[in-house]
Image (cartoon, grey):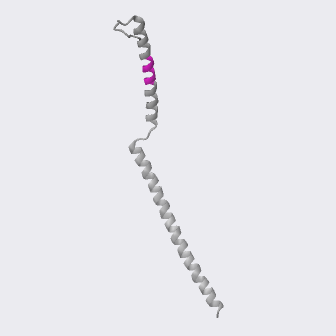
C-alpha cells in the first residue's frame, strides 16, 4: 500500500493489506504451535524436583557403598600388614 499522499485506500490496497495480515497471522500461528509443542515437552518444576531427588538419593547410596569399600580396604590392608609382620617375626625365630 503505497500511499504517499492522503489519497483514500483502494480495494486493491485493502486486499494487499489483508493478504499481508493473513501471512503474518499464519506465521504467528505456526510459531504458537511450535512453542506449544516445545512447552509440552518441558518438565514441570515438580517433575524436575522429583528427578533431582532420585538422583541425589542414588548418589547418596553410591557414596555409602564407596565409603564401606574404603573402610573394608583399609581394614584388609591393616590385616595384611599384621599377617606380614607375624610372618617376618616367625621367620626370624
- Against 4, residue 64 (above or below) is below
Q: Quadrant of residue 17?
A: top left
* Most distant residue in the bottom direction: 93
Q: What quarter of the picture does the C terminus occupy? A: bottom right
- Against 49, residue 89 (above or below) is below
Residue at 42% across, 6% down: 12
Across and down, in percent, residue 30 comes to: 46, 25
Across and down, in percent, residue 75 comes to: 53, 75
31 or 88, which lies in front?
31
Residue at 33% across, 8% down: 6
Residue at 38% across, 10% down: 4
Report if residue 72 lies within the magenta region.
Answer: no
Main secondary structure found in the magenta portion = helix
Across and down, in percent, residue 10 comes to: 39, 5
- Against 68, residue 15 (above or below) is above
Residue at 45% across, 20% down: 26
Across and down, in percent, residue 92 comes to: 64, 92
Q: Quadrant of residue 85?
A: bottom right
**In this image, 91 relative to 28: left or right?**
right
Which residues are drawn in magenta?
A: 22-29
- Against 35, residue 45 (above or below) is below
* Most distant residue in the front direction: 5
Q: What quarter of the picture does the N terminus occupy? A: top left
Report if residue 25 lies within the magenta region.
Answer: yes
**In this image, 11 relative to 67: left or right?**
left
How many dots with numbers? 0
Amino acid at each position: 500500500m503505497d500511499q504517499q499522499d492522503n489519497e483514500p485506500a483502494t480495494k486493491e490496497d485493502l486486499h494487499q493489506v489483508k493478504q499481508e495480515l493473513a501471512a503474518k497471522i499464519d506465521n504467528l500461528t505456526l510459531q504458537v504451535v511450535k512453542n506449544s509443542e516445545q512447552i509440552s515437552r518441558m518438565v514441570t518444576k515438580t517433575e524436575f524436583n522429583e528427578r533431582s531427588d532420585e538422583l541425589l538419593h542414588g548418589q547418596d547410596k553410591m557414596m555409602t557403598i564407596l565409603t564401606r569399600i574404603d573402610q573394608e580396604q583399609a581394614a584388609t590392608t591393616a590385616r595384611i600388614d599384621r599377617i606380614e609382620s607375624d610372618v617376618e617375626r616367625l621367620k626370624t625365630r
